[in-house]
Image (spheres, rainbow, N blue to C red):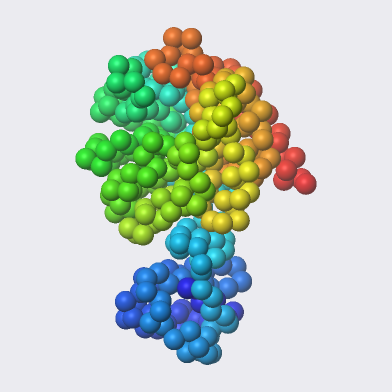
Amino acid sequence: MIAVLKQGTNDKQIENLSSWLKAQGLDVHISKGSDHTIIGLVGDTSKIDEDLLSGLEMVETVKRISEPFKSANRKFHPDDSVIRVGNTSVGGSDFAIMAGPCSVESEEQVMEIAKAVKAAGATMLRGGAFKPRTSPYDFQGLKADGIEILLKAKAATGLPIVTEIMNANHLPMFEEVDVIQVGARNMQNFELLKELGRTNKTILLKRGLANTLKELLMSAEYIMAGGNENVILCERGIRTFETYTRNTLDISAVPMLKELTHLPIIIDPSHATGVAKLVKPMAMAAAAAGADGLMIEVHNDPAHALCDGPQSLTPEAFADVTKAVRRVLAAVKED
């Protein structure tokens, strides 16, 4: 349920109404927009007399939300959320570009890539310290040592870092990580999501290989229900019967999610296609569709990468992509 308050409602009135609603055993979320203030109610709203609430002088309308996701719902929060990460942000008028190697392999490798992607316009450094692999015999990542290498690159370049978590028990290692990524395979690891909801870390939540947008938003709801509203959604391609690409990039997810939620949405064209030469056109398409950012895999020697070399761009190719994306963003803005 949401209550839209009339223009001119002051902070004291909002505080009094909020206190009364909390006394009814409800969680109250207040969203102040440019025109209206919206109070979102989560919990058993059947105990609330809708006529009584709508009859209050300060209340313009009362609506019930049929969708199961509440905190992530745009009806709760009409304005786009802007998630601040270090010296940059995701959402609103800002376009984030997260770039770096699929897997952290060495300090020398990460440092070289970090400096290159920053020079090309990246706003964050991504890198895998823990690697979920289909085969137990494949490289599983440097784990804690990988995080230490990423932190050194952060200190050298100033770029906030993004890296994936596999287990809630690893959370102490992520204390200095700026954005914790939940990979596609863990999108519905609800116990992990609950733990992340108790933190104040920014969470990058990737859509599962065969999950619907509703399921993605319900996973975001798990995090937000715990009190952490710093969530970024990521479309990384879904599994279809197509075999020419690694996955199928659902570009329609961007405008659809923009209608359903206030949370920022970024696109990962590297995992979506699995083919380096397709990253540029898909990145441009994402920018044109209204995405809030990109996550792109960059490696200084893709042919010898320990993980996902075929989809990784060289630093030179990444610089070309960022230039193309800027042109698209400028064109969309002018339009």
Residue 110 lies, in percent from the top left, at: 40, 21
Residue 212 lies, in percent from the top left, at: 51, 46
- The mark tally for this picture is 0
Q: Quadrant of residue 159?
A: top left
The single residue placed furthest to the top in the displayed view is 304
Q: Nearer the viewer, residue 48 or 180?
A: 48
From this viewpoint, is residue 270 visible?
no
Left/right of residue 171 with respect to residue 66 in the rendered view: left
Left/right of residue 102 with respect to residue 142 in the rendered view: right
Left/right of residue 301 with respect to residue 333 in the rendered view: left
The single residue placed furthest to the front in the displayed view is 241
Q: Quadrant of residue 250?
A: top right
The answer to whether residue 69 is above or below residue 139 is: below
Which residue is rendered at x = 59% and y = 45% of the image?
Answer: 253
Which residue is rendered at x = 41% and y = 76% of the image?
Answer: 45
From this viewpoint, is residue 21 visible?
yes
Q: Nearer the viewer, residue 101 or 159?
A: 101
The answer to whether residue 99 is above or below residue 260 is: above
Which residue is rendered at x = 44% and y = 9% of the image?
Answer: 304
Which residue is rendered at x = 52% and y = 90% of the image?
Answer: 55
The answer to whether residue 328 is above or below residue 51 is: above
Residue 154 lies, in percent from the top left, at: 38, 31
